[in-house]
Amino acid sequence: MSKNSPERDGPAIEARGLVKVYGGNRALDGIDLTVQRGQVFGLLGPNGAGKTTAVRVLATLTRPDRGTARVLGHDVIRARDAIRARVAVTGQFAALDADLTGYENLSVLGRLHGLSRAAVRRRADDLLTAFDLTGAAARPVGGYSGGMRRRLDIAASLIVTPDLLFLDEPTTGLDPRGRGRVWELVRRIAAAGTTVLLTTQYLDEADQLAGRIAVIDRGRVVAEGTSAQLKSRVGSGTLHVRLLDGAARPRARQVLADTLDGTVRLAADPLALSVPLTAPTDATDVARRIGHAMIRLADARVPVAEVTLGHPSLDEAFLALTAHKTAPTTEQAGRRAAGSALGHTDGSVRGRTTGREVAPATADEEDNA
């Protein structure tokens, strides 16, 4: 491998036009993604948006119907083994043996990856310490809390340090404390040099962890950028005005509507009103617009007690970008189809495991399709 080869220097993930169809429904509908090495990249979207399907395609657990993708420089169809040797996948539900202890789970996986017994002992001890599980190492995993199982599952995915870690909704079902501990682990993993692709439906999680975020909805990427860039797409924030005299609120409403070209909202408090600054602008322009509005309020003899600017949140950006009526999702339909094919009516997909790789029973048969 040359020093400048794509396997070493190109993006960790480069996907173009990925399409995945389940029973006529498009779980992925032409997704483009580029994830640079060393990033924590967030895939943010509502339930069934296509996040898990995207992970399965990129992790070589299912084939795309159209489009191309390269992971760590390797094609996801032609070089699956090369990719699988360098990535790890942790899903929404911990893939652990409940009858084995925490240490035994790590030991079995280490041996499956070809580590010597001595190397397994060292690595398992290091991971149990790093993930604050030493005290539970000798206990069967079936007795672990949800947060402990999730931490052990992530630890297991690191038994051999991957170049790329797929974390598919790793904090689903955890309480706030458990989520916070997983967040800290993700930060440590990224700081050690592993690229992380994180899928989540939690806005604060993407905001806290991801350096770059793609918002995915109905199988398509509808926006991409940093958290700040996505927030800016819904405007520059909301101007909140508190008056000294409630009788002046009608005048204040008219002045703000004329000056800021926005829809003025009247709060239940008769002294309060607000207006979104809908046009994305820079800080200097925002200050100019607010200053002009204050002058106009003074000219109209509106007594103002307080003015504050609330910055846009990722929640607002997310709702604006994914606003639509709820309907049966294509990804959920795909899961049901895959589950039915394996005899599961709950929509789950279960199959054999090899090391940390979890694939449906039909995954390898796709080679012969």
Image: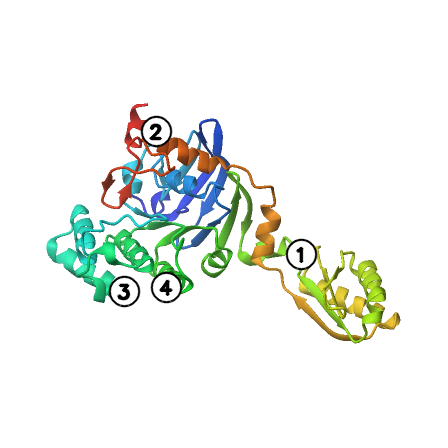
Label 4 or label 2, whichever comes before in sequence order = 4
Label 1 or label 4, whichever comes before in sequence order = 4
Q: Nearer the viewer, mark 1 or mark 2?
A: 2
Q: Indicate the quadrant where residue 359 lies.
A: top left
Residue 110 coordinates in the image, percent (x, y): 18, 51
Residue plotted at (36% across, 42% down): 73
Residue plotted at (53% across, 39% down): 218
Label 3 or label 4, whichever comes before in sequence order = 3
Q: Measure how far apart labels 3 and 1 are at the Cα level.
A: 42 Å
Q: Measure how far apart labels 3 and 4 are at the Cα level.
A: 11 Å
Q: SS for tag 2?
A: helix
Please tell me which residue lies in front, 79 or 356.
356
Q: Indicate the quadrant where residue 280 lies.
A: bottom right
Residue 166 coordinates in the image, percent (x, y): 36, 48
Mark 3 residue crowding within 10 angstroms, few (<14) / some (14–19) / many (20+): some
Which residue in the protein does label 2 denote?
341
Q: Nearer the viewer, mark 1 or mark 4?
A: 4
Which residue in the protein does label 4 denote?
181
